[in-house]
Amino acid sequence: MRVSKKMTGSCNEQQIDELRRGPWTLDEDNLLIHYITCHGEGRWNSLAKSSGLKRTGKSCRLRWLNYLKPDVKHGNLTPQEQLLILELHSKWGNRWSKIAQNLPGRTDNEIKNYWRTKVQKQARHLKIDSNSKVFVEALRQFLVPRLLEKVEFSSSSSSSSSSTLKNLNSQPQVKGKVKEAPLENMSSNSNIYSSNSKRIVFPYLAESSLQSNAYFVENNNFDIMSFNHSNTPEFRTNDTSALEFQMAEVDWMSQDLVDDTFWNMDELWQFKK
DNA sequence: AATTCGTACAACCGCAGGGGT
DNA sequence: CACCCCTGCGGTTGTACGAAT
């Protein structure tokens, strides 16, 4: 494989000829890990040259940040993380790196892939533009409640302690405009699930119901204060009347959707039985 | 069993912005 | 100020793999 001259930065012709592309081998991974362990990360172009890797600095950086770095989480996104992505995407759009900063251990690339393969897939299925208000409403009305129930389900089944989801109706409810969530609590340097009772408010969700919604992260669990999606005033707007029609047209329990883990209702129905 | 199709995800690409000279 | 280099971001592509036919 050849690498175009444009992408190589300061490489000369001979170096370009030698550069490798495509999937990383185990040896290359080990070499990169070893080099960064000894010399630290950064200065990727010089790292690429000094390490002996026949890769561009860009490629080394990407491989390290997205895959090899020790604190990178691998595996499926939890329902909590999915909710957070939906929430943050509704606020910031395709600002993947910014979103990733609030999901410790998750990379922008992973979140971007998740959005494209799982969320946009549903938009295609519904024949809705994934950036449209209509699709945001669809997520709000159909996906978010399911994810919330998944969170509840996983919490109640995985923990016997009182740290599971709790109805916090006895807590003072947030009235009016919901305050911006203290997202700094979820910075990349802190584990959002590890601190005790850090309050996280999802304004996107809050806006979707007459009563505001607040979630408490406590001992690895989200606590639902309230989620009253049936009272969504926006659903009475002109914009969403079209959505109602489309929702009626789409079989949300079709095999295609059910098979998808993102929307899989199997466990939910099992839970409800 | 062979082929086609769809999905997930790793990797690449172009571009913009910042810092140094 | 202009230029160069480096870094990071977001969009896109390539490919491995499992499911469906």
Image (cartoon, coloured by chain):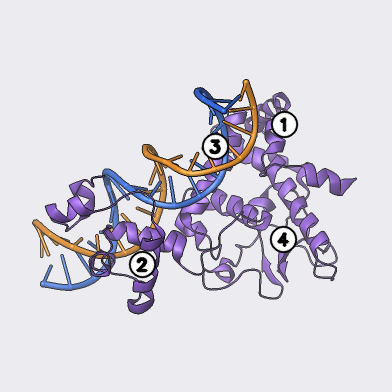
Chain colours: A purple, B blue, C orange
Query: Which chain does tag 1 point to?
Result: A
Q: Secondary structure at mark 4?
A: loop
Q: Real-space Cα distance between discs 1 and 2?
A: 44 Å
Dot in front, 2 or 3: 2
Report x, y in % for residue A68: 45, 64
Q: Chain of mark 3?
A: A
Q: CA distance from mark 4 to mark 3?
A: 26 Å
Which numbered mark, 2 or 4, is in the foreground of this view? Answer: 2
**In-image side of A148 versus A66 (left or right):** right
Q: CA distance from mark 2 to mark 4?
A: 43 Å
Mark 3 and mark 4 in contact (Cβ < 8 Å)? no
- Residue A130: numbered disc: 3
Query: Considering only order in the chain, which callout, 3 or 2, is on the residue closer to the N terminus?
Result: 2
**A177 and A162: which is toward the camera:** A162
Q: Is residue A14 above or below residue A263?
A: below
Q: Are marks 2 and 4 in contact (CB under 8 Å)?
A: no
Q: Earlier in the sequence, mark 2 or mark 4?
A: 2
Task: Tell me the number on the disc at residue A255.
Answer: 1
* Residue A119: x %, y % from top left: 58, 41
Q: At label 1, which amino acid type do we have?
A: Gln
Decide which of A258, A16 is in the foreground and name it: A16
**Residue at 28% from the left image edge and 61% from the top image edge:** A57
The answer for which chain carries disc 2 is A
Residue in view at x 69 percent, y 43 percent? A143
Question: x and y percent of residue A23 in the render?
Answer: 39, 51
**Mark closer to the chain start, 3 or 1:** 3
